[in-house]
Amino acid sequence: MSSILFDVKDSIATITLNRPEKLNSFNREMALLLQEKLDICKEDKTIRCVVLTGAGKAFSAGQDLEEVIDPKGPGMQRILSEHYNPVIVRIRELKKPVLAAINGVAAGAGANIPLCCDIIIAAKSASFIQAFSKIGLIPDSGGTFFLPRLIGWQKASALMMLGEKVSAEDAEKMGMIYKYFDDEKFADAVGTISNKLASMPTMGLAYTKKGLQWSSTHTVYEQLQNEDKLQQWAAATADFKEGVNAFLEKRQPNFKGE
Ligand code: LHQ
């Protein structure tokens, strides 16, 4: 069985981390396969939404710690630059929405990869742990960038230093995730949100993603210019025309992602 499952249906690509017996912890094979699947999502024009989730009771326990000490393993020097950083870059650069569907415990890199996704939802029984400090490491996979921006510097600092487990309910309250759902309603919520995303104006969403990304490194004056540029790009899409026509004709729009 592959350590990554990949399924495309109704314009939605579902990528499932699949090492449930190891709580979907990342080894080199799984990290490289995830990159490969994200590349397919980039190239395949029929895909208009990506869902990232885990098999079994965990989302991901982060790095497979057995691999770290394996003398035949990739070694510390390569793990970030070849495994995690390329995943974060691919997700941020993907011109399609990525929904992180956190089905269970998310720890270490497994807690931080979702933070770079466009929307994070979680099952009520899921939890988030900045586990790095417990083994003497620093939070990686973009965690030091995304977490303070989502929940504020102080809470991020405390969670990263103390390594305390955060429930899905608290994660929602502090703004780490968008929403949590009761476990029995979670699969339906993933379906509803991903279907909605896949039927929306994909390029408009991609430019929204770009605008948010740029906002973290630009002044308000620069950002006003950026919004002007992005808005021109969005207005040049066929979906913008369709959206306006559908509104004026009082009908549902039929967006094609173009
Ligand atoms: C595991 C793991 C795991 C192997 C559970 N590896 N087996 C970047 C730079 C370079 C190197 C290092 O890493 C990084 C990025 C990182 O992600 S660093 C952070 C790595 N992750 C952790 O430190 C988390 C370790 N895991 C845990 O704290 C717990 O397992 C959590 C809180 C995730 C879940 O707790 P429980 O639900 O109580 O499950 P468990 O601890 O009993 O684990 C179940 C099994 O999974 C167990 O094996 P066993 O044979 O006893 O059933 C664990 O050893 C194994 N496992 N995480 N990361």
Image: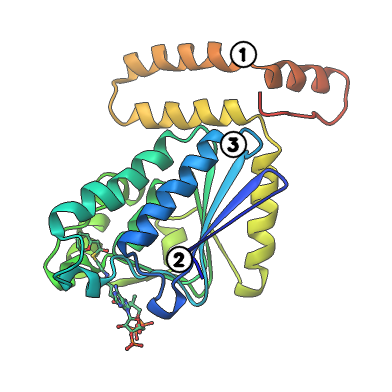
Q: Nearer the viewer, residue 37 or 157?
A: 37
Mark 1 is on which residue type?
Ala
Kindly identify which residue carries mark 1: 235
Quarter of the rendered structure image containing ligand 1: bottom left
Does the image show residue 96?
A: yes
Vertical arrangement, residue 193 with respect to residue 234, above or below: below
Kindly identify which residue carries mark 2: 3
Q: Earlier in the sequence, mark 3 or mark 2?
A: 2
Q: Looking at the rendering, which quadrant does residue 221 occupy? A: top left
Mark 2 is on which residue type?
Ser
Q: Earlier in the sequence, mark 3 or mark 1?
A: 3
**187 on left or right of 29:** right
Q: Nearer the viewer, residue 191 or 184?
A: 191
The Cα–Cα distance between marks 3 and 1, rounded to whole angstroms, is: 23 Å
Vertical arrangement, residue 40 with respect to residue 215, above or below: below
Q: Which mark is residue 44?
A: 3
Residue at disc 2, secondary structure: loop
- Within-10-Å neighbours for mark 1: few <14, some 14–19, many 20+: some
Vertical arrangement, residue 156 with respect to residue 185, above or below: above
Q: Earlier in the sequence, mark 1 or mark 2?
A: 2
Task: Indicate the quadrant containing the C terminus: top left, top right, bottom left or bottom right.
Answer: top right
Image position, residue 226 (x, y; %): 41, 16
Q: Which mark is residue 94?
A: none
